[in-house]
Amino acid sequence: MQRREFLKNSAAVAGGAFTLGAPSIVSAATSLKFDSYVSDSAGPSWTDRWYLDELEKRTNGEVEVRRYWSGSLNKVGEHLAAARDGTSEMTLIAPGYYQAELPVTRGLDWYFRMNRADALQRVCRETYEKFDPLRAEWEERHRSKVLYWTTWNYAPLILREPIDSLEGLKGKRIRGYGVATDVIEALGGTAIPMAAPEVYPALERGILDGVYGFDFVTAVAYKLHEIAPNFYDIGDGPHGTSAVIMNKAVYDGLPDDIRQVSDQIVDEIYDHKFAEIYGEVLERYVDTAKAEGVQMNTISDAEKERARGLVQPAQVNKWIETVAPKAGVDGEEMQSIISDAIAKYDPEGVLRRPYEIATGS
């Protein structure tokens, strides 16, 4: 079958299924490994599985993807190097685990600047396209192509014991991840950096009083509520800018039609599929959480604004003043691009927060 014919047929696919009678590709010509440090039920994995499934379906088997979940191929913190060096062709990268290696990307990681997780995804794409140093950090320094930006939707503040206000965080030991530690410290808690697999036993042994920077879906999937059932929406916006990447040489070496099919799938993720997938998953997990005793709480609008004032603009300015100069980039230029993208995309965001789903607001 000619590749031009394959591309024509694959472009006609609706929802990933070939039209009746479309020619098929007999055998797999491209075998890829996808490597993730989290389980296949963790937050971003729902979108990742859809992308991988569609890539296989729309190429009718010309692309095969072997999937390694839960750090079964590489351990937490090893995935960026694995993709760069070709040990894994594709992987999920959570930049909070690679703060020294991804200083420019850290400029995309903050809280209390916008409202919707699906909008954050589009903000990241636009910044990647417009700010050359960000793209160079991935494609030149780490020899990887960002296939698509993703997020960990929303991260509630999860506590063993309930609080009446943010003052109740004073002195509490809260697991933090990446810049989530800034939020914990700004609100008076003590941030304890810790990898995701260690969190449940740390809560169980009383090492932690709570968790922040752990997205809602994964928190429920990992059963954190069995020990810490109090979930608080603190108005911090979307959480956990992340990226699914492919080794750049592998991406460039794909046949043109395969790359275009991948790009088409990615466009659908940005256009509607991310919000559609996550919306369904969040509704399901909210129902599970409520049935299993999670207390879905929020704080007052006044408390949210107070929290915002404690975190921003200090969090962004810290990156501009300390990280960007060391990385040799114009931090103010990058943040200006981001601010313009937020103004463009955040009003269009539709992905509701778990508390909104739980209360029908």
Image: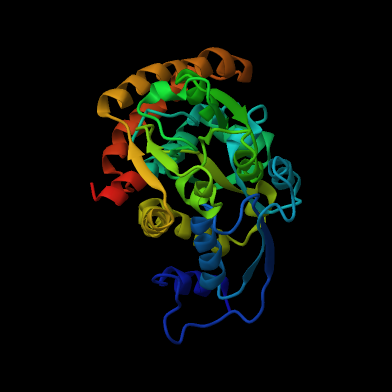
Query: On screen, 162 above or below 4?
Result: above
Indicate the quadrant where residue 33 lies.
bottom right
Q: Which residue is painted at 42% across and 85% down in the image?
A: 20
The percent position of residue 137, horizontal first and vertical second, equals 61, 32
The quarter of the picture where the N terminus appears is bottom right
Residue that protrudes farthest toward the left in the picture: 361
Q: Which residue is painted at 42% across and 52% down in the image?
A: 293
Q: Which residue is painted at 55% across and 31% down in the image?
A: 105
The way the protein has been coloured in the rendering is rainbow
Indicate the quadrant where residue 101 lies.
top right
- Of residues 285 and 30, the one nearer the viewer is 285
Q: Is residue 168 visible?
A: yes
The percent position of residue 31, horizontal first and vertical second, equals 69, 66
Residue that protrudes farthest toward the bottom in the picture: 21
Q: Is residue 330 visible?
A: no
- Of residues 209 and 110, the one nearer the viewer is 209
Count numbered badges in the picture: 0
Query: On screen, 179 above or below 259?
Result: above
The percent position of residue 310, horizontal first and vertical second, equals 40, 17
- Of residues 133 and 179, the one nearer the viewer is 179
Position of residue 325 in the picture relative to residue 220 (left or right): right
Q: Which residue is painted at 52% across and 54% down in the image?
A: 221
Position of residue 10 in the picture relative to residue 112 (left or right): right
- Of residues 237 and 300, the one nearer the viewer is 300
